[in-house]
Amino acid sequence: MNDYRSFALIPAAGMGKRMGASINKQYLLLEGLPIVARTIAIFESSPLIEAIYLVIPADEIPYCREHVVEACGFRKVRAIVPGGRERQNSVMNGLNAMRPDVTDDDTVLIHDGVRPLISPALLTASIESARCNDGALVAVQAKDTIKTVRDGIVIDTPPREMLWQAQTPQTFRFGIIYDAHRAAERENCSGTDDASLVERLGGRVRIVNGEYQNIKITTPEDLVLAEAFLARRRKEQ
């Protein structure tokens, strides 16, 4: 039996301005349930996950506790942590809240609160990869040709086979990701994602082949697409 455990850290502290809704995007309904509730449910139902830590804007914590955690009967949510100024600060707040309960060898899956279509298979693959590397990054290969542009002029066309679109979860042993965030905080460094903070310290982050339906819901169009994916899943069951 493995002597390590796996925990989910779900940052959902964004304001969702691109959605243009009257409430933050994580509380918009996706087939009758708040988006963030659908995300939490995946980790709640996984036998691999010991506990869940949510990171929410401080003034929304009572609402989230009542209308998401308690309303849905989630039992694995161990703490609802106030978010920070930026996502990186929010993740650091979450890691600090987790620290008394985890060991450096326990595994942490950091997953966007508005990615509610992650599959259980990707959770398993992420954990297994993180045990053998300094981190595991779920990603999909870019479908479109990508251009590097300066002042509106194309200056380079990177080889598409080398380009991957990062998703979540991004999974690490706790000691590695905690040290990476602490170093970034100490050196006032902002990373594009959690994996980039491990990379800057020379860490080896392994790609886990993701799924194109594992979308991040940030616009009204994304919500329509998510509904379509859920409808297709029901037909395939």
Image (cartoon, rainbow, N blue to C red):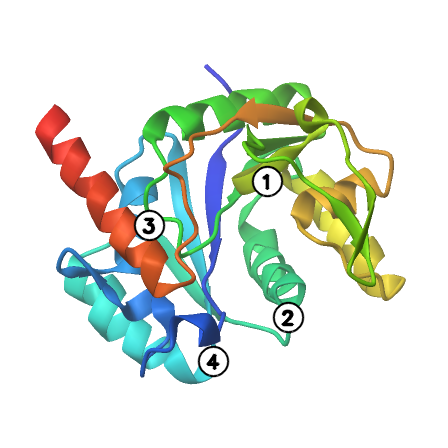
Amino acid beneath label 4: Ala
Q: Nearer the viewer, mark 2 or mark 1?
A: 1
Identified at 59% across, 38% down, the residue is: 165
Identified at 26% across, 55% down, the residue is: 224
Quick check: can you spot residue 75?
A: no
For this rendering, which residue is in front, 92 or 115?
A: 115
Question: Which residue is labeled 2 in the image?
Answer: 86
Question: Which residue is labeled 1 in the image?
Answer: 166
Which mark, residue 222? none
Question: Which residue is labeled 3 in the image?
Answer: 39
What is the number of callouts on the image?
4
Residue extending furthest toward the right:
187
| Helix, strand or loop under label 1 | strand
Image quadrant holding the C terminus, namely top left
- The answer for how far apart the CA atoms under marks 2 and 4 are is 13 Å
Does label 2 or label 3 sit earlier along the sequence? 3
Image location of residue 191, percent across then percent down: 75, 55
- The answer for how far apart the CA atoms under marks 2 and 3 are is 21 Å
180 to 35, vertically: above or below: above
Amino acid beneath label 2: Glu
Amino acid beneath label 1: Ala
Label 3 crowd bin: few (<14), some (14–19), many (20+), radius 10 Å: many
Image location of residue 198, percent across then percent down: 77, 41
